Amino acid sequence: MSSLKYKISLFFDTIPLIYRKEQSKSWDLYRKSNKIGENIMIWDKINFGTNAKVKNKILPLIIFIDPDWFYTQYEYKDSFLRKKFGNQAEIIYHRSRNIKPKKGHYIKYFLFSDYTSDSFLPISIEEAEKKFSDCIETGNYCQDIELFDSQQFKILKKIDLIYSRSLKKYDKKSNRIFIKDLKEYLFDGKNITEKKAVEFFENIDNFIL
């Protein structure tokens, strides 16, 4: 094959590969690259539905306002959210379910007596593994007998924002409590602006991926 023919052949063989790379903006791509300052993601504002709390807001901010709305929309594979905000929704879904606790912490997830979510508290890794190893990411619930505390809890190595919804759908009360405690734990109770929400979700160091 002549040099010219080889170059032409190589060019056309490469086109499908380039196309596939451009089209494969999958979760795997974003999980490896989203650092603060690498603004590879353009966050579109929600422009559908009747929920005034999320209208004209971007997904990184919405998850701190009404996570139940987001997870409800995400659960429907043919939803407008999945169709029009596909990659953005994937990023928020996976990252909001895998938030990294502060160094040295696991997370205790509590239950109310009616088996709905009573939010969470951090627990030191040392204490968790010493006293409650049977409850660390096993699905089992424990009680702190030493403190005569009958409230049940389980322990995960991450913060999972879907926890309240996993126990009871449309549980607005439990979601409000969880988000309030999350802001207190991660942001010292400060208000979450759009800029702060974007910075948080675009920094992969904030997540266990």
Image (spheres, rainbow, N blue to C red):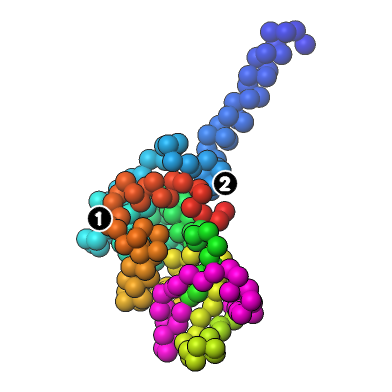
Q: Specify the amino acid type for callout 2.
A: Asp
Horizontal and vertical percent for residue 156?
Answer: 55, 70
- The foreground one among 81 and 69 is 69
Q: Which residue reaches farthest left? A: 52
Horizontal and vertical percent for residue 66?
Answer: 32, 64
Which segment did they paint magenta? 110-139
Q: Specify the amino acid type for callout 1.
A: Lys
**In percent of the image, x 33 and y 57: which residue is there?**
62
Say which residue label 2 marks.
Answer: 28
- The kind of secondary structure element at disc 1 is loop
Q: Earlier in the sequence, mark 1 or mark 2?
A: 2
Horizontal and vertical percent for residue 10?
Answer: 67, 19
Say which residue label 1 marks.
Answer: 55
Left or right of 87? Residue 137 is: right
**In percent of the image, x 54 and y 78: which residue is there?**
154
Left or right of 100? Residue 85 is: left
Crowding near pointer 2: few (<14 within 10 Å), some, many (20+)? few
Q: Can you say which quadrant of the picture contains the C terminus?
A: bottom right
- The kind of secondary structure element at disc 2 is helix
Residue 117 shows in the view: yes
- The foreground one among 77 and 100 is 100
In the picture shown, does residue 191 fall above or below 20? below
Crowding near pointer 1: few (<14 within 10 Å), some, many (20+)? some
- The foreground one among 19 and 95 is 95
Q: Can you say which quadrant of the picture contains the N terminus?
A: top right
**In percent of the image, x 35 and y 64: which residue is there?**
184
**In percent of the image, x 50 and y 61: which residue is there?**
101
